[in-house]
Image (cartoon, rainbow, N blue to C red):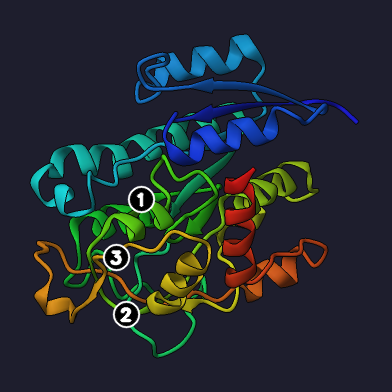
Amino acid sequence: MSKHTILILGKGYVGTQLNEYLQSSKDINIFHRSRAELDYQHRGTLQAFININNITHIVNCSGFTGRPNVDECELKKWECWNLNTVVPYNVNVVCERTGVEYIHISSGCIFSGYDKAWEETDPPNFGVDSECSFYSRSKHAYEEISKKCCIVRVRMPFCGDFTGRSYLTKIKNYNDLVDYKNSKTYIPDLCRFVKTVIMSDYTAAEVGIINVVNPEPLHTKDVAEIMSRNGMRNPLWNWVPIEDLKITAPRSNCTLSINKLENMFPDFKIQSESSAMEQAFINYSK
């Protein structure tokens, strides 16, 4: 089997976890670059790097989510639009030009509501044509102009690293919580999936848009119970209606379907959300 040479873009939460996971793969060579190390928003610079290093796949984990949350996107709209829409499109164009397989890590926060578990074929109802956060608008906008790539939609990513931007870290640090049921993505499962796509017979374009979330989504109160059971309860937790939160941007609350994932990759087993959270705490204790 020939080796693949992967370029991971972005050294944030997901990019760092993916790089660490793929390092153990003997059949994959890895380059991991931040924007400071490689100006990948500049098409010529990226194309030269691809040609020199014989890159076969790019996994784009970069983007702008805002700190401490998406409310910052309302204040820094240019940066949000540039990093979530323009830069991914420039990478997409270069990949198409050079024949590189492009996997873009995106967001499922372009849906809201519980009419159904949203599927990849459903038109987003929390994006460019609706009242939504600017973050969601920028994510949906890239999907509208993307071509011949794989877009992996994740939601509320978490893992056993409680020093980073894990969903569980955020829940632990928030005093006021709202109780909604939401799909979430266990980062080790996401990393396994990215490798599965790379090693599969599918092209990135054939995979297309795909939801990668853990099945059987939990309510926030279920998550808090698991955290309390594992010694990570915040004694200041207070359950409030969302109207009481001091937030600027509307929030997406929804669940995503993984029917496409299960049908397209029947051998890829993904654990339930509760099992994944218990596993996160096992990893944390180690």
Q: Which of marks 3 and 1 is nearer the N terminus?
A: 1
Looking at the rendered structure, the secondary structure element under dot 1 is: helix
Residue 11 is left or right of residue 200, and the answer is left
Rendering coords of residue 264 (x, y %): 73, 66
Question: Which one is in front, 99 or 122?
Answer: 122
Given contact means CB atoms under 8 Å apart, are the residues at marks 1 and 2 in contact?
no
Q: Dot 1, how many residues are within 10 Å of its Cα: few (below 14), some (14-19), or many (20+)?
A: many
Residue visible at 26% across and 76% down in the picture: 178
- Tell me, for residue 235, which label it has, or none: 3
Q: Which of marks 1 and 2 is nearer the N terminus?
A: 1
From the image, which quarter does the N terminus lie in? top right
Rendering coords of residue 76 (x, y %): 12, 42
**Residue 190 visible at all:** yes
Calculate the distance from the C-alpha at mark 3 to the C-alpha at mark 2. 17 Å
- Tell me, for residue 179, which label it has, or none: 2
**Residue 96 visible at all:** no
Residue visible at 20% across and 72% down in the picture: 130
